[in-house]
Image (cartoon, rainbow, N blue to C red):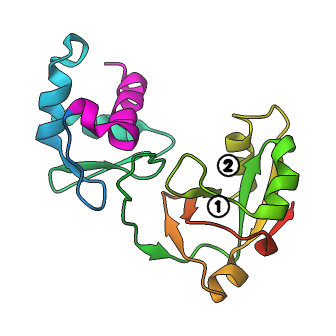
Amino acid sequence: MDYFKLSKEISYALRHAPWEYELELDDEGWVDIEQLLITFRINNQWKHLDVNDMVKMVEISDKKRHEISKGKIRALYGHSITQKIKKRTGTPSSIIYHGTARHLVEQILNQGLQPMSRQFVHLSADTDTAFLVGKRKDFSPVILRIDAEKALDEGIRFYKGNNTIWLADFIPSEYISIE
């Protein structure tokens, strides 16, 4: 079983195109595992897929993109679907980070961080994660420092994505500086 490929396909189905897989996500992005299995098994590549494969996929993933609970599965972050996924608010450490391409820094410092094609702005709990995320768009990304404590005190809401990813609806520029 190629768990990396499975993770990517499940991510696509749950984050970006549930309708292509005839999946109905609830308000928090959960879908019944059996519904997902039925849909995936139509494809010959996944015809022997079972719950244990999905559990193992979640367990061995280094990025913790999915969560399984009570017979359901969901993607933890990265959604681009129009249905807004409800998240519970949380409290990050006082400083969190965002890795970005160098050519976007001036725009972000002027206009703040916006979710762009995603539902939420993605932030990192540490500079290493921010660097890896930023490296997807620039070989030498800039690490931005977010004053989460001040933002939280002034009404900005944060949502936990996983152990290293935090989410926000928007981060105004006054809470952002270059690390």
Can I make out residue 102 in this image?
Answer: yes
> Camera-side residue: 64 or 78?
78
Q: Magenta span has 86?
A: no
Residue sitting nearer the eye, 28 or 68: 28
Q: Residue 80's mark?
A: none
Question: For numbered disc 1, what is the local secondary structure?
Answer: loop
Q: Most extreme residue toward the bottom, as rendered?
A: 153
Q: Residues within 10 Å of mark 2 (few under 14, many from 20)?
A: some
Q: Amino acid at mark 2?
A: Thr
Tell me if mark 1 has few (under 14), some (14-19) or many (20+) residues whose alpha carbon lies within 10 angstroms of its own: some
> For the point 11% across and 30% down, which residue is it?
38
| Residue that appears at 16% across and 57% down | 70
Magenta stretch: helix, strand or loop mostly:
helix
In the displayed structure image, the side of residue 100 where residue 125 appears, left or right: left
Q: Specify the segment rendered in magenta.
A: 1-21
In the rendered image, which residue does mark 2 sit on?
A: 129
Q: Are marks 1 and 2 in contact (CB under 8 Å)?
A: yes
Amino acid on which disc 1 is placed: Ala
Give the residue pinned by disc 1. Answer: 125
Pinpoint residue 161: horizontal percent, then vertical percent. Answer: 48, 58
Cα separation, mark 1 vs mark 2, equals 7 Å
- Looking at the rendered structure, the secondary structure element under dot 2 is helix
The percent coordinates of residue 41 (x first, y second) are 16, 22
> Residue 137 occupies which quadrant of the picture?
top right
| Quadrant containing the C terminus in the rendered view | bottom right
Image position of 10 (left or right of 123): left
Q: Residue at x 80, y 75 (%)?
A: 174
